Structure formats: C-alpha cells, structure tokens
Image (cartoon, rainbow, N blue to C red):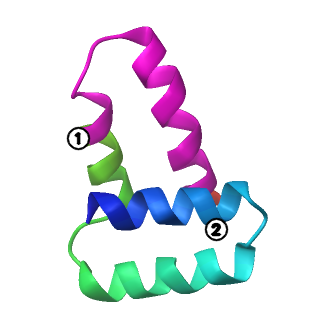
Amino acid sequence: MGAQLLVMAALLLTGRHTEAAGMVVSFRRQYPESPAHAFERLWLFRSPSPVYRAQVYPLFEKIRAT
C-alpha cells in the first residue's frame, strides 16, 4: 500500500498523469474504506522531523490533486 502511494507520487512528479490517475482509481477500489488522508496522517506521524514532513507532504498534495 505504501509502495503504491510512492509510485503514484513518482508518476505525478514525472508528468505521467494518466498513469497516476489509473493507479489512484485502482487504489480506491482496493481500499474503499481507507481514504488517502488516513494514509497521509500515518506517514506524517511517523516522524516529528520537519524535514521529513516537508518531503512527504508534497507527495500527498499531488495525490489529492489527482
């Protein structure tokens, strides 16, 4: 599940929006009861480091925008 989120973010960051959107649809089908913000909170709370959070937060911004 975490790997899927990273792949989605990587696709978005490299401009492969159609592939990323397909992964988002697939992810939502696999985890219908688990919204992306639940995973975002889990990842953000892994570390109180502002550097870590600054690196992870933009990835979820991209996923949410898809």
- Residue at 41% in and 87% down: 26
Q: Is residue 59 above or below residue 5?
A: above
Q: Is the C terminus in the top left, top right, bottom left or bottom right quadrant?
A: bottom right
User: How far across and how far down the image is residue 45, in percent?
Assistant: 24, 27
| Residue count near mark 1 (Cα–Cα under 10 Å), binned few <14, some 14–19, many ≥20 | few
Q: Is residue 4 left or right of residue 16?
A: left
The reply to whether the magenta stretch includes residue 61 is yes
Q: Earlier in the sequence, mark 2 or mark 1?
A: 1
- Give the residue type that dot 2 points to: Thr
> How far is disc 2 from disc 1 in space, using C-alphas?
20 Å
- Give the residue type that dot 1 points to: Leu
User: How far across and how far down the image is residue 44, in percent?
Assistant: 32, 31
The reply to whether the magenta stretch includes residue 44 is yes
Q: Is residue 40 left or right of residue 50?
A: left
> Which image quadrant for residue 21?
bottom right
Depth check, front residue: 36 or 19: 19
Q: Which mark is residue 21?
A: none
User: How far across and how far down the image is residue 8, in percent?
Assistant: 52, 65
Name the element at disc 2: loop
Q: Which mark is residue 66?
A: 2
Q: Provide the residue designation for mark 1.
A: 42
Total numbered labels placed on residues in the image:
2
- Residue at 51% in and 48% down: 60
Q: Is the N terminus in the top left, top right, bottom left or bottom right quadrant?
A: bottom left
Q: Is residue 20 above or below residue 10?
A: below
Quick one: which residue is furthest to the right in this view? Answer: 15
Q: Is residue 31 above or below residue 22?
A: above
- Residue at 36% in and 51% down: 37
Name the element at disc 1: helix
In the rendered structure, which segment of residues is drawn in magenta? 43-64
